[in-house]
Image (tube, helix red, strand yellow):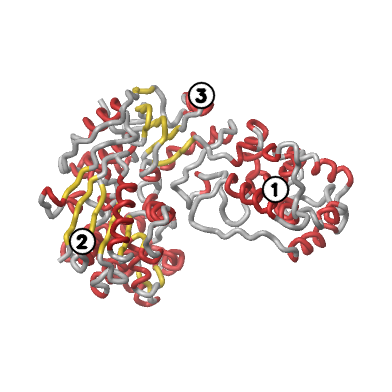
């Protein structure tokens, strides 16, 4: 039987770095016979990007590994709209199926509630004999629909792997499993089944940072069975938390009933924790404070428990032309308004238009390539810009012209990455990058050509197709306020829920204590739910590298810090 080793990584102690070194060492000793899994896609992607000496097929989330091992079955959650059409009584929202959004949706459907409860009971391996009748009724409908269509849901992937994939894919000698505190009991059953066929495995995590209890995770599943001390290691030096924040967070997490006690040292700086008179409903009260930090070169993170609590702030940020993002939420374009998504983004189109005068070129202006022209001409009104009948003919020419294709991947890209790649391409191109452009520009009205060649952004915005103006308003306002460089720089402001930034950090963190009514009710009636919220707040606190602001609640449903 394979030996399980357990590694606890308190906030900022370099757990992923430690794990990466152990993976490299094991891969060398065992000829690459290693499997690596993490709880979230973001963490798995980070491990892939570290270029570990392990085949890409052997790295992924537990669901991804099972998906590959089971022959890539059809996933039921991808066909929710079909289910809703056939069973409107149990309508499930698309957003509600995403793990990070289960708590964040302000108004969930009855189907969301029942679906989540069913998956929690399956995740915790609670026998159907004790399920309430409402869940049993839904389960019969859900299972029947899946069977009829040949689908498997995410929990099925784990359950079926337990039955038919007793040994981990590619029969590795060593296994590494990260963020294990968020694995569910059924997932850990599979992990330990696989480990039993290995020489050894390292399960790394931090029970104090278990924040997916609403999806079935429990710290107890990670902590059990108890291991002899020689098989347990606690990383004991935080490179993130200063003394004041570490002490404050530590005193908070000690209130949790079930946990593995850990001692770890803060970094050599004081830091600060401040009670701050600001509420999520009134971002205008703290937005200037954030701007001052950003202008001073600091990174700032604003955190809430639910995504709807961020809407007032995002509105103000857009009105004030302050760049922000959430690099950990790749699927949410509204939290990454300067990011690339769904093909060519408006940011790319604006940067393509501005290239001849973009300050990064210095004194040498860069002329457009055909691909650049195509990006911004496509979204312009032709009236007053192009000669009569020219747009259709030009777009056909541009479509047929060789363009630079960029592979879409799961990583969040800012304009900086896109533009830098184009700089490199242009510098290395053997033939004239402007070839064909003059012919295209000859089809412009004289005034339009003059304004375009002058990179007149007001003219560009004025002549956008009506449907594109709303999308362009925010990035255009950023250029007007900060210059084009601001579109290709990584924003210093991160806006997100606590769940969405797990693993992230910033110099300054603003933490809002408000809860949804549902979360508050659950906390009032159940100790384990209260502990779950304490762990959630602990994760929020420990993102801070220098300063932590504990903000004022907006209503009665909130965590009390004092």
Dot 1 and dot 2 residues touching (CB under 8 Å): no
Is residue 252 shown to the viewer in this render? yes
What is the distance, in whole Å, between disc 3 and disc 1 at their CAs? 31 Å
Q: Earlier in the sequence, mark 1 or mark 2?
A: 2
Query: Residue at the location (37% across, 33% down)?
Result: 544
Where is residue 482 drawn, in percent x and y? 63, 32
* Farthest-out residue, front: 29
Q: Secondary structure at mark 3?
A: helix
* Residue 412 falls left or right of residue 225: right
Q: Is residue 60 above or below residue 145?
A: above
Q: Secondary structure at mark 1?
A: helix
* Residue 418 falls left or right of residue 128: right
Task: Say which residue label 3 marks.
Answer: 292
Where is residue 334 drawn, in percent x and y? 52, 46
Category of crowding for the residue at label 3, using alpha-carbon neighbours closer than 10 angstroms: few (below 14), some (14–19), many (at least 20): few
Q: Quadrant of residue 118?
A: bottom left
What is the distance, in whole Å, between disc 3 and disc 2 at their CAs? 50 Å
Q: Which mark is residue 352?
A: 1
What is the distance, in whole Å, between disc 1 and disc 2 at their CAs? 52 Å
Query: Residue at the location (83% across, 48% down)?
Result: 385
* Residue 60 falls left or right of residue 423: left
Task: Say which residue label 2 marks.
Answer: 200
Where is residue 86 drawn, in percent x and y? 42, 69
Query: Residue at the location (37% across, 70% down)?
Result: 68
The mark total stands at 3
Q: Quadrant of residue 265?
A: top left
Q: Between residue 485 and residue 348, name the one nearer to us.
A: 485
Is label 1 or label 2 in front? 2
């Amino acid at each position: 039987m394979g030996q399980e080793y357990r590694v606890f990584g308190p906030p900022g102690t370099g757990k992923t770095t430690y794990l990466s070194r152990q993976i490299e060492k094991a891969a060398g000793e065992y000829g690459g016979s290693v499997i690596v899994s993490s709880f979230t896609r973001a963490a798995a992607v980070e491990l892939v990007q570290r270029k570990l000496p392990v085949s890409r097929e052997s790295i992924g989330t537990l669901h991804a590994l099972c998906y590959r091992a089971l022959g890539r079955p059809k996933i039921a959650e991808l066909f929710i709209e079909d289910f809703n059409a056939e069973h409107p009584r149990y309508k499930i929202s698309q957003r509600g199926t995403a793990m990070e959004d289960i708590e964040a949706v302000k108004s969930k459907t009855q189907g969301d509630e029942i679906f989540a409860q069913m998956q929690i009971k399956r995740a915790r391996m609670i026998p159907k004999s004790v399920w309430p009748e409402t869940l049993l009724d839904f389960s019969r409908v859900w299972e029947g629909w899946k069977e009829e269509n040949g689908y498997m849901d995410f929990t099925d992937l784990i359950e079926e792997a337990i039955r038919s994939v007793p040994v981990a894919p590619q029969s590795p000698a060593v296994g590494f499993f990260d963020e294990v505190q968020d694995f569910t009991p059924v997932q850990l059953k599979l992990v330990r089944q696989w480990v039993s066929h290995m020489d050894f495995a390292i399960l790394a995590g931090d029970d104090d940072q278990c924040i997916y209890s609403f999806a079935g995770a429990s710290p107890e599943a990670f902590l059990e069975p108890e291991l002899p001390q020689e098989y347990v290691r606690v990383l004991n030096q935080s490179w993130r938390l200063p003394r004041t924040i570490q002490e404050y967070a530590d005193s908070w997490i000690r209130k949790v009933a079930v946990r593995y006690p850990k001692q770890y040292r803060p970094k050599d700086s004081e830091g600060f924790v401040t009670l701050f008179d600001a509420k999520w409903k009134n971002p205008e009260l703290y937005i200037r404070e954030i701007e001052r930090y950003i202008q001073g070169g600091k990174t700032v993170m604003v955190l809430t428990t639910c995504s709807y609590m961020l809407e007032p702030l995002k509105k103000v940020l857009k009105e004030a032309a302050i760049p922000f993002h959430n690099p950990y939420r790749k699927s949410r374009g509204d939290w990454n308004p300067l990011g690339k998504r769904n093909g060519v983004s408006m940011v790319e189109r604006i940067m393509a238009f501005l290239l001849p005068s973009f300050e990064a070129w210095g004194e040498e202006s860069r002329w457009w390539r055909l691909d650049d022209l195509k990006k911004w001409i496509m979204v312009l009104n032709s009236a007053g810009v192009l000669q009569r009948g020219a747009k259709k003919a030009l777009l056909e020419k541009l479509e047929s012209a060789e363009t630079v294709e960029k592979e879409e991947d799961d990583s969040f890209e800012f304009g900086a990455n896109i533009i830098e790649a184009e700089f490199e391409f242009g510098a290395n191109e053997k033939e004239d990058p402007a070839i064909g452009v003059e012919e295209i520009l000859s089809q412009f009205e004289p005034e339009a050509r003059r304004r375009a060649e002058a990179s007149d952004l007001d003219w560009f915005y004025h002549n956008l197709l009506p449907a594109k103006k709303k999308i362009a308003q925010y990035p255009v306002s950023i250029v007007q306020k900060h210059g084009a460089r601001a579109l290709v720089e990584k924003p210093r402001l991160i806006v997100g829920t606590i769940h969405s930034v797990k693993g992230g950090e910033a110099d300054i963190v603003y933490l809002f204590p408000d809860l949804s009514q549902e979360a508050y009710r659950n906390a009032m009636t159940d100790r384990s739910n209260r502990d779950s919220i304490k762990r959630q707040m602990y994760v929020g606190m420990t993102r801070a590298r220098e300063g932590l602001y504990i903000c004022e609640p907006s209503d009665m449903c909130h965590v009390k810090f004092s």
